[in-house]
Amino acid sequence: MTSAISVSHLDKTYASGFAALKNINLEIRHGEIFALLGPNGAGKTTLIGIICGIVNPTNGRVTVDGHDIIADYRAARSLIGLVPQELSTDMFSSPWTTTSFSRGLFGKPPDPAYLQKVLRDLSLWDKKDAKIATLSGGMKRRLMIAKALSHEPRILFLDEPTAGVDVELRKGMWDMVRGLRDSGATIILTTHYIEEAEQMADRIGVINKGELILVEEKAELIRKLGQKQLTLELREPIAAVPPQLAKHNLTLADGGCKLIYSYDTQREHTGVTDLLDDLRSAGLHFKDLFTTESSLEDIFVGLVRQQQ
Amino acid sequence: MNLYAIGAIYRFEMARTRRTWMQSIVSPVLSTSLYFVVFGAAIGSRMKTIEGVAYGAFIVPGLMMLMLLTQSVSNAAIGIYFPRFSGTIYEVLSAPASAFEIVLGYVGAAASKSIGLGLIILATSALFVPLHIAHPVWMLAFLVLTAVSFSLLGFIIGIWADGIDKLQVVPLLIITPLTFLGGTFYSTNLLPPFWRTVTLFNPLVYLISGFRWSFFELADVNIEISVAVILLFLAVCMAIVWWIFKTGYRLKT
């Protein structure tokens, strides 16, 4: 079975000489939500731009459901819907006009019932004839999604879809994206919000300085790279970690009231039992303990720092 | 052929004209009427005929051409510049539409608007002067060819321009002066030999002359040469537009 998107040996060097993408190889599967993470200027938007036909590649090949984006651009592009980062739409037309325009542009015959459904799903139906300039920021953002969905794409690119959107609306958008995935669409998402990727993505790619550092299942990524921390709340504060506990690399926190032990969940022996035994031997007593796991954000920051 | 895309761009552009009908239609018609009052009534009362044609009627093809050229360029330039400026061009570039289809949508709409405007001006002229069109088919052919060619030029300008001020540079500083100097209000045959030779380097002389011939069978230059010049101009503009889409000049990075 062909991938939804296949990118091989893709390079992009701008006229200024800036290498925005370096030998990118990536397979995106049908029906998944793929989150592309990376700091500003990492190459996320350039990669999306090339796949969608807005940016010319320097080298390499991209196929969309097996269709080459250059040789067979009509078939490739008709499968794709793009929600760009910027709120770019004609401010003088209405949601109904602009979504009808988008549908026609992508070669689809008029279908008022479908457009009505899209606008209703995005809570824009009441504003269908309003001038776009009068809509709120959140409504404009949803309108960009409506435009991208207007031609019934099977692959949807969301470039920072919830930038500047309030928490409630963001969660509503996540539900909508999940709904799209459940209906069989493939979603490629770029975001600065790690929480967004953590909540929604099936797989995650991390891009930095034009290079794809890593592509992994989200759960597997957290499992592989995740660190766990055991925090012990002591009954009595201590001034320093006792020498007999030095081998555990403990961190003293909260004015000597907490001892923090970091360990790798993948190791055969986590060392927790040994630590508890040594604590007892050292005469330290704790009143409570709890564990915390690395978030995707911790992993992402770690990966980017490692590359720098 | 993505006919829906062509239709979508065409309808969108025509809708813009409806939104701005004061500038798009009323303003050019008013300007033309003023030309009639100033040149037709004031000067025409002293200069009765040119080569046997009433002066008021003689200037009609030139005035139509003046409006046709400036409006074709402006309409097409704004049509493509605005999406570039606002960022909405991403949608057109990512659509499954060929360069030809995109150009057909934008240039077709710009040309339609100027042709419509030309016909409105023709109808307005009929209110001021008695009109007779000797070769209506040729008149329409010149109208369409000129509108399409100069809309293509406008499309090129709209892509080249990196600021709103540049959109007006070519229509105001090149097209309008060349039209005025190209025999809009006079026959170049009335000029002294030296200046008549100079005007032959003005390509708009051939358009105005050919267009006027279709009305009165009067031409400053050979009609075949007029047709050849307009076709050559069309071919050059098409070649530049082809190059723009091939290289992505100012459209793609």
Image: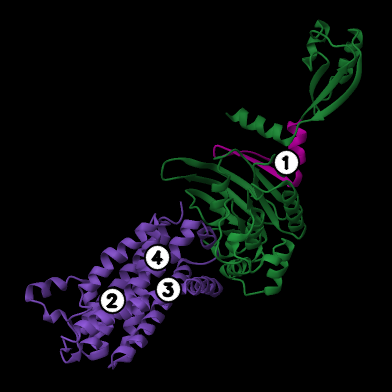
Chain colours: A green, B purple
- Element marked by disc 4: helix
- Count neighbours of disc 1 (C-alpha within 10 A) and say few if under 14, some if 14 to 19, many if 20 or more: few
* Tag 1 residue: A195
Q: Position of residue A60 (x, y in %)?
A: 52, 49
What chain is tagged by disc 1?
A
**Chain under numbered label 4:** B
Mark seen at residue B77: 4
Going by the numbered disc 3, the residue's amino acid type is Ser
Q: Disc 1 versus disc 3: distance between alpha carbons?
A: 50 Å
Q: Is residue A72 visible?
A: no
Q: From mark 1 to mark 2, how far is it between C-alphas?
A: 61 Å
User: Which residue is tagged 3?
Assistant: B24
**Which of pointers 1 and 2 indicates the residue nearer the eye?**
1
Q: Is residue A200 magenta?
A: yes
**Picture quadrant of residue B67:** bottom left
Residue type (three-letter) at the residue carrying disc 4: Ala
Callout 2 crowding tier (Cα within 10 Å): few <14, some 14–19, many ≥20 = many
Q: Nearer the viewer, mark 4 or mark 3?
A: 3
Question: Magenta segment range?
Answer: A198-226
Q: Position of residue A253 (x, y in %)?
A: 78, 17
Mark 3 chain: B
Q: Secondary structure at mark 3?
A: helix
